[in-house]
Image (spheres, helix red, strand yellow):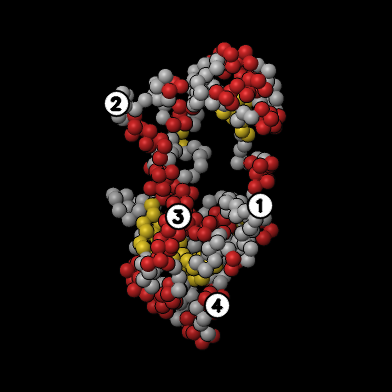
Amino acid sequence: MSNSQAPLAGLRIVESSILGPAAITTALADLGAEVIKVETPAGDYIREMTWPIIEGVSLMHYHLNRGKRSITLDLKREAAREVYRDLVKDAEVVIEASKPGALAKFGLGYDDLRQINPRIVFCTVSGYGMTGPYKDMPSHGIAYDTWAGVVMPAYDDEGFCYIPEHVGIGINAAPLFGGLAVLAAVMRARQTGEGAFLDLAQSDAAAAFDWYRSESHMAYGRPESVVTGNKSDGYKRRPVATAGMREGVRYQLYESSDGHVLFMASEQAFWKNFCAGIGRMDLFDRWPGSKYADHARGNRELQAILREIFKTRTSGQWIEFSKEANTPIAPVNTPKNLVDDPQFQARFAVMPHETHGADMLGFPVKFVAEQLPAASRAPTAGEHNEAVLRQVLGYGADRIEFLRREGALG
């Protein structure tokens, strides 16, 4: 697939971003959108943030800004602001991924830009959004997870509180919700000529992503005569969401002879298949369970038996058994060894560090019988100044020289 045939070919996005919120356009660039990252002359300091640092540049920059072009503009200067307006004239999206109102301070906010391009979709991405008592608080990515109740405090042996290892939710969920909203707004703008102003908070995204736990607590706040547990649990409430998995037996983690596997025979049919496959129908006869969602909650006797059974085979052997017996057993990988998993290797084409600066996972959705265009390496600050000015805006040598003299490019 050529770039011109990519799913989002022809979609031009002007992005003013610093740090993690730049993630909102990463997948859009993977899908073929033209993303022009407008940076200050000093550049986005994402290149120095977090670890690992690879040949002086952060993995975060390599990952989040791949496939984008960079132009440096000193927006304190009118000549630079004029370039920005020219970029917006033929763009469909503007991303303000820093502090809400950052562009408005330069006369480049939504109300200003819609005068230039009524169809523009303007999305401001921030920590807590444009409204609410936290809107002006400075923050970083983990704040949205602690705010949303995703990360629980941990304590070390000396009694000091620390941030436990966890999956970052807000910084990853925001691009998914935001990208969906941006594309929806673009579709409407193309049909109606009306643009949109989107307010995306990474904290909101974290809460929305973890809806099951929050909504379960809200449900349990209602009378027990109205909100109960599963039929298989005798309608007794168990702890909310995945906290209720601790008591499970037929849906539980087990140690294999060389690691761990996840056993998930909560449906009676799968449980029967498992027992038949290992030649232990006595277990099914004794504990047949309910038809659906039966984890054999709290059955320590059965759990002790299964613990010994799972130790008799390797994780790989249990995975093969899962396919043969038609009973759900899953690998338990780590972020370190995931890349060695055969399913991972069959599905992901890792972008190599030789061409992209870091080894990275690409866009996860497959276009059957198609190949998405390869994203380019994340840019250095201002790497595409000349190309954007000439190729995108059609500026001639005299205009570019004028911008340089005026300090518009830094």
User: Which secondary structure lies at badge 3?
Assistant: helix
Say which amino acid is labelled 3: Leu
Local packing at callout 2 (Cα closer than 10 Å; few below 14, some 14-19, many 20+) is: few
Where's residue 55, x and y in %?
Answer: 63, 58
Q: CA distance from mark 3 to mark 1?
A: 24 Å
Local packing at callout 4 (Cα closer than 10 Å; few below 14, some 14-19, many 20+) is: few
What residue is drawn where x is 41% and y is 30%? 240
Tell me whether the residue at label 3 lies in contact with that at label 4, contact meaning CB atoms closer than 8 angstroms: no
The residue positioned farthest toward the bottom in the image shown: 398
* Label ID, residue 180: 3
What residue is drawn where x is 45% and y is 55%? 180
What residue is drawn where x is 47% and y is 66%? 13
Which is nearer the N-term, disc 3 or disc 4? Answer: 3
Is 149 or 268 nearer to us in this picture? 268
Q: CA distance from mark 4 to mark 2?
A: 65 Å
Say which amino acid is labelled 1: Ala
Residue identifier under label 1: 349
Tell me whether the residue at label 2 lies in contact with that at label 3, contact meaning CB atoms closer than 8 angstroms: no
Residue identifier under label 4: 391
Instruction: Decide if residue 381 is in sight here.
Output: no
Say which amino acid is labelled 2: Pro
What residue is drawn where x is 46% and y is 48%? 173
User: Which secondary structure lies at badge 4?
Assistant: helix
Where's residue 318, x and y in %?
Answer: 67, 28
Tell me whether the residue at label 2 lies in contact with that at label 1, contact meaning CB atoms closer than 8 angstroms: no
